[in-house]
Image: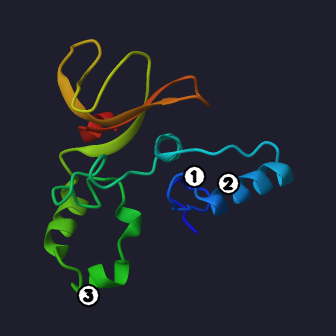
Amino acid sequence: RAGSTGEDGFELLAPPGAPVLERLAAELLRLEPLVRPGGAYCLDILRMEAGLPRVGADIPSGTVTPIKASLAWTLDQSKMRHHLMFGWQRLFFQLAKGPKLRRVGLLLDGPAHAGCRLLSNPHRQPIGTVASTAWSPALQRRVAMAYVRPEYA
């Protein structure tokens, strides 16, 4: 049982064409005609639409704190207060001063890819960088996660 998209779900791993998967898919389609199989890209789109970051894509491994990643709500407040959390000094500093960049979700009007610089409007000054993008069939436009200066978050 897994929930990497913000929804309850199941991930089944088996060799391609495994008979058990074929039977399971046939039974699911019989019981729920609207159910469709989806791959990793479908899960990635759902995850991005839900605003859930992925370590390695939206959260560079080892370089981003929960504060910068807009995940302060995941920190154990008791451990923070009692200084029982590794890196608590840096986290307190970022909570007090705010990070230089914050992770945000974006709806894009045009093409973009990971690594694209974001420019302010109308002065066209750099304000951040795109972390990841995907086409959202539900929204009929591109969605992205990016790191931007706090005043633009």
Residue 17's label in the rendered image is 1
Q: Amino acid at mark 3?
A: His
Residue 95 place in picture, x, y as percent? 25, 62
Q: Amino acid at mark 2?
A: Glu
List the residue tagged with mark 2.
Answer: 22
Q: Are marks 2 and 1 in contact (CB under 8 Å)?
A: yes
Mark closer to the observer (3, 1): 1
Secondary element at tag 1: loop
* Sooner in the amino-acid sequence: mark 3 or mark 1: 1
List the residue tagged with mark 3.
Answer: 82
In the visual, does 55 lie left or right of 123?
Answer: right
Secondary element at tag 3: loop
Classify 10 Å Cα crowding around label 2: few (below 14), some (14-19), many (20 and above). few
Residue 93's label in the rendered image is none
Decide: is 138 above or below 1. above
Q: Amino acid at mark 1?
A: Gly
Residue 79 place in picture, x, y as percent? 30, 84
Give me the C-alpha separation between circle 3 and circle 1. 53 Å
Which of the 4 image quadrants contains residue 34?
top right
Residue drawn at x 58%, y 28% as measured from the top left: 137
Secondary element at tag 2: helix
